[in-house]
Every structure is written in structure tokens, then in C-alpha cells.
């Protein structure tokens, strides 16, 4: 038995070393291959438009752009947060760099067009790059969501970016700007679960819009990207906990939130590598490959490995998620019973 154990240990060690060697070769090859086709991303000297730029991912993105030599314009609905963000960003600006702030409700088409026009007028030049980070989630039971809330959630997860994309594409194309537009989606634009019925619907729609525009805007030299972050440690995320259903919290309890700056770092690295759909988390990569559709991948070699791994792991993940949710069935039905939600008696099981 001892001899057998030692032989097994040696075999496992040998396999481990082999796996490490293969992994290193794959990484080197994939990096080299992607380097041949990489489209340079360099915001230095560009005029960058950032929605949701007063806080969270939007602010972290604006800060990175500024530090890399770009002029920036941030847009937010909250005038107080906007003024604070503008002041702190202006303190980081180098000689000649512009920091412009515009208040607007981007869930409205006319406000989105007005905000872009004002940014262009104040900056004295056309926008070269846009990072659409504005958005909000309010996790809730679908059965408890009113029709007004359903519409509002779609405004805050889809239209808040779609109106800006429409205004930007029309402006860039008509002024022959070879620009870049980054739409910020979510892990929940690839898959969804209890609590996110309204929010996820908007992110799925946003991904569909990005996929179609990625192809159409090739006609106008406008580069479209869809960034899919996972959980970000922001004030908005903290506020979600007040409304989040118990099963949702249970499903997410092991998740590690990323800081907004860390998340922005993943976005920039993805853009530097020429990725259409950069992500910020490994499991999001698996989800991306499981529902990619007819769009370019990121890294052909790593994507193949992720796709193979996802094919094995995703069914297990789905089974585990469903099992957790089913565990709340009695509790949830009891709460609905107490509210008088049910209109007929529970059918007899005898």
C-alpha cells in the first residue's frame, strides 16, 4: 500500500508539472497570437465621455482615463455627487487637460442628446471614446414588482445606455469620427436567477444591441465593446441588500466583490487586448463562452479551454443553484400565504 501510494503521488506530481508546463505554453502562445491582431487602445489625447461618472465604475474609469492623458466629460443625474467628482478629478488633471461635468437624466432620449451636445460644446471638439457606466439594479421578487417598476427597471438597465448609444453613433458617424463606444453590461447579461428578472432583462437586451452594433458600426469605423463585470463594491451594491430576496443573498453569499478601480483595470486590459467582450471575473468568462452567439471571441486558445471547462461545469452549477432556490419554497409560499396572495386553496396531495 505504501509503495502504491508513493507511486500515485509521483504520478500526480508528474501530471501537475506537465499541466503547469502545458498551461504556460498555452498562455505564451495565446498572448503571442493575440498580439498579432491586437488593436491598439490608447486614450492619451482623446476626448472621453463617461456616463455614471460621479461614482462607482464610472468614476474609476474617468480617473484612469485622466491619468492616461485623456480629456474627460462625466455625466450624472445627481448634481451634488457630480460636483464632488468633478472637483476631485480636476485635482488629478495635468496641464491643459479638461474635466467637464454635465447633469442629465439619461433614461430620457432628449436628455441624452442634450448631454452629448453640451459635452461637445463645452469641450470644443467631438467625442472620441465613450464609456457608458450609468445604470442601477433593484433586486426584487418578480411577483412583487409593479408594472411601473418593471418599466423603470428597464429604463435603468437598458434605455439609460441605449439612448446614449443612439446619440453617439449618429454623431460619430455623421462627423466621420473613428471612435470607440463601450457599453457596460453585467454577468447577469449572460445568465440570471431569482431576484434579477427586471434588471437582467435589460442587460440581455443591451448585449443584443451591442452585438448588432458591433457589426453595423464596422461600416463607420466605430468600435463597439460590451463589458460584463460581476459584483462591484459600490454604494449601489450596498443599497441593493435592502430589497434583495433571501434566496438571492444565499446564491451570492460566497461571491467576492471587486473594487470599482479593480474592475476598471479589467476593462482597460481587455480593451488593450482588443477584446469585444472583456470581463472581470473567471466565472463570467465561462458564462460568456456558454452564450457567446455569433460574435468574436477574446482569446482563441483560452476561449477553447474555457468553453470545454464550461461544458462540464455549467450543468453542475445550474443544478446547485436550482437546489438552493428550491430549499426556500416552503418559506416563500408561507409568506405569500400570510399576505393573502393565493386565491385558491393548496391542492390536496393525497
Image (spheres, rainbow, N blue to C red):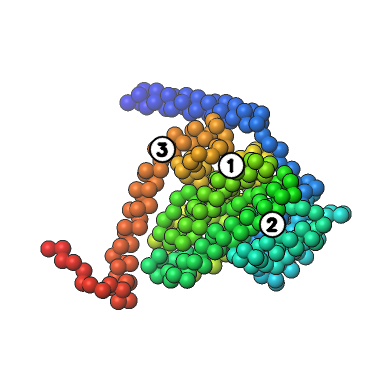
Cα separation between marks 2 and 3: 36 Å
Between marks 2 and 3 in the image, the one whose residue lies nearer the viewer: 2
State the separation of the CA atoms marked 1 and 3. Answer: 27 Å
Q: In which quarter of the image is residue 100?
A: bottom right
- At horizontal 36% and vertical 23% (from top left) the residue drawn is 3
Q: Residues within 10 Å of mark 3 (few under 14, many from 20)?
A: some
Question: Seen from this angle, which residue lies furthest front?
Answer: 174
Q: Quadrant of residue 298?
A: top right
Q: Mark 2 points at which residue?
A: 50
Specify whether residue 315 is in view: yes
Is residue 6 visible in this depiction of the protein? no
The residue located at (54%, 26%) in the rendering is 21
Q: Residue 279 carries which label?
A: none
Residue ID for mark 1? 215
**Residue 132 x/y as whole percent:** 64, 55
Q: In this view, does 225 lie to the left or right of 254?
A: right
In the image, taking residue 225 as reference, residue 147 lies left or right, namely left
Question: x, y (%) of residue 4?
Answer: 35, 24
Q: What element carries label 1?
A: helix
Q: Observer-nearest residue: 56 or 46?
A: 46
Counting residues from the N terminus, which is met first, the one under dot 1 or under dot 3? 1
Q: Of callouts 2 and 1, which one flags the residue occurring earlier in the amino acid sequence?
A: 2
Residues 160 and 288: in front is 160
Contact? badges 2 and 3 (CB < 8 Å): no
Q: Distance between the residues labelled 2 and 1?
A: 23 Å
Along the polypeptide, which appears first: circle 2 or circle 3?
2
- Give the crowd class for mark 2: few <14, some 14-19, many >=20 residues within 10 Å: many
Quadrant of the rendering where the C terminus is positioned: bottom left
Residue bearing the label numbered 3: 311
Amino acid at each position: 500500500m505504501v509503495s502504491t501510494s508513493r507511486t500515485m503521488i509521483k504520478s500526480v506530481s508528474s501530471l501537475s508539472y506537465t499541466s503547469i508546463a502545458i498551461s504556460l505554453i498555452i498562455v505564451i502562445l495565446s498572448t503571442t497570437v493575440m498580439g498579432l491582431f491586437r488593436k491598439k487602445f490608447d486614450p492619451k489625447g482623446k476626448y472621453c465621455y463617461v456616463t455614471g461618472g460621479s461614482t462607482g465604475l464610472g468614476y474609476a474609469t474617468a480617473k484612469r482615463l485622466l491619468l492616461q492623458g485623456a480629456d474627460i466629460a462625466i455625466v450624472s443625474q445627481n448634481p451634488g455627487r457630480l460636483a464632488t467628482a468633478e472637483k476631485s478629478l480636476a485635482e488629478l488633471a495635468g496641464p491643459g487637460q479638461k474635466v467637464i461635468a454635465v447633469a442629465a437624466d439619461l433614461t430620457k432620449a432628449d436628455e441624452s442628446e442634450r448631454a452629448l451636445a453640451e459635452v461637445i460644446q463645452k469641450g470644443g471638439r467631438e467625442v472620441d471614446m465613450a464609456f457608458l457606466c450609468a445604470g442601477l439594479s433593484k433586486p426584487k421578487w418578480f411577483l412583487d414588482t409593479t408594472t411601473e417598476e418593471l418599466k423603470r427597471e428597464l429604463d435603468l438597465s437598458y434605455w439609460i445606455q441605449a439612448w446614449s448609444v443612439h446619440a453617439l453613433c449618429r454623431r460619430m458617424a455623421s462627423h466621420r469620427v473613428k471612435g470607440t463606444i463601450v457599453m457596460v453590461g453585467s454577468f447577469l447579461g449572460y445568465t440570471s436567477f431569482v431576484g434579477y428578472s427586471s434588471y437582467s432583462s435589460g442587460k440581455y437586451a443591451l448585449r443584443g444591441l451591442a452585438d448588432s452594433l458591433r457589426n453595423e458600426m464596422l461600416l463607420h469605423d466605430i468600435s463597439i465593446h460590451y463589458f460584463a463585470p460581476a459584483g462591484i463594491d459600490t454604494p449601489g451594491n450596498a443599497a441593493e441588500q435592502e430589497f434583495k430576496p433571501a434566496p438571492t443573498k444565499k446564491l451570492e453569499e460566497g461571491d467576492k466583490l471587486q473594487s470599482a478601480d479593480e474592475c476598471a483595470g479589467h476593462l482597460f486590459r481587455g480593451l488593450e487586448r482588443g477584446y469585444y467582450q472583456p470581463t472581470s471575473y473567471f466565472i463570467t468568462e465561462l458564462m460568456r463562452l456558454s452564450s457567446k452567439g455569433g460574435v468574436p471571441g477574446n482569446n482563441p486558445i483560452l476561449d477553447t479551454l474555457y468553453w470545454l471547462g464550461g461544458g462540464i461545469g455549467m450543468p453542475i452549477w445550474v443544478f446547485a443553484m436550482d437546489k438552493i432556490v428550491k430549499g426556500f419554497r416552503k418559506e416563500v409560499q408561507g409568506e405569500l400565504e400570510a399576505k393573502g396572495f393565493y386565491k385558491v386553496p393548496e391542492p390536496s396531495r393525497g
